[in-house]
Image (cartoon, grey):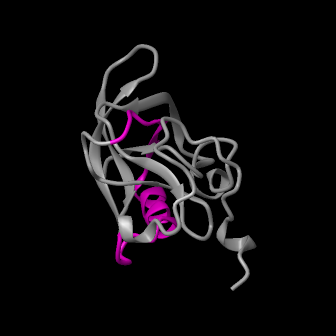
């Protein structure tokens, strides 16, 4: 049996945002965390999506939420984040608690810069934008 994994979310998967209920509603919430290193995170693309780029040392320390997920939930998140399609990937990064506790390594979802067209914001520490259009509301 596979062991649970930690996942750090910083955008539309956070509590109160459109993808949370479909992705993490039944996962174990471990609290507010942030990246141990700086990463560029911004809002971009035709659907106003929060995107973080795997460029450690650039950008800002990004705030988000840490969850413990089972393998089925991780697979669902991978589908939601288009893992396997060009420019979409996940990597383990170090995250630290916002208040107290221990740091850990958690999966985070990243995008390639070519997906960030057009760019709608500068680099952000925290995603609070409400313009994201979830897949079920998109007109194709």
Q: Is residue 1 visible?
A: no
Image position of 98 with respect to 24: above or below: above
Q: Nearer the viewer, residue 118 or 107?
A: 118
Q: Which residue sits at x=46%, y=44%? A: 123
Quadrant of residue 18 within the rendered picture: bottom right
Q: Quadrant of the C terminus?
A: bottom right
19 relative to 136 in the view: left or right: left
Quadrant of residue 8 within the rendered picture: top left
Q: Is residue 117 visible?
A: yes
Q: Position of residue 87 (x, y in %)?
A: 35, 71
Q: Which residue sits at x=53%, y=36%? A: 126
Image position of 100 with respect to 96: above or below: above
Q: Position of residue 100 (x, y in %)?
A: 41, 13
Image position of 63 with respect to 53: above or below: above
Q: Which residue sits at x=44%, y=47%? A: 41
122 relative to 2 in the view: left or right: right
Q: Nearer the viewer, residue 127 or 99?
A: 127
* Residue furthest bottom as drawn: 140
Q: Position of residue 129 (x, y in %)?
A: 65, 46
Q: Nearer the viewer, residue 16 or 130?
A: 130
Q: Which residues are magenta?
A: 59-87
Q: Quadrant of the N terminus?
A: bottom left
Q: Position of residue 59 (x, y in %)?
A: 35, 41
Specify whether residue 78 is painted magenta. Answer: yes
Specify whether residue 124 is painted magenta. Answer: no
Q: How many numbered marks appear?
A: 0
């Amino acid at each position: 049996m596979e062991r649970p994994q930690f996942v750090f979310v910083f955008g539309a998967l956070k509590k109160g945002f459109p993808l949370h209920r479909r992705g993490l509603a039944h996962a174990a919430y471990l609290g507010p965390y942030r990246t141990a290193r700086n990463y560029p995170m911004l809002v971009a693309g035709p659907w106003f999506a929060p995107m973080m780029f795997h460029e450690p040392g650039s950008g800002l320390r990004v705030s988000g939420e840490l969850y413990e997920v089972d393998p089925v939930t991780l697979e669902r998140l991978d589908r939601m984040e288009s893992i396997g399609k060009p420019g979409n990937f996940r990597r383990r990064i170090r995250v630290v608690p916002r208040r107290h506790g221990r740091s850990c390594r958690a999966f985070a979802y990243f995008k390639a810069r070519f997906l960030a067209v057009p760019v709608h914001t500068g680099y952000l520490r925290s995603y609070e934008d409400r313009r994201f259009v979830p897949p079920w509301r998109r007109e194709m």
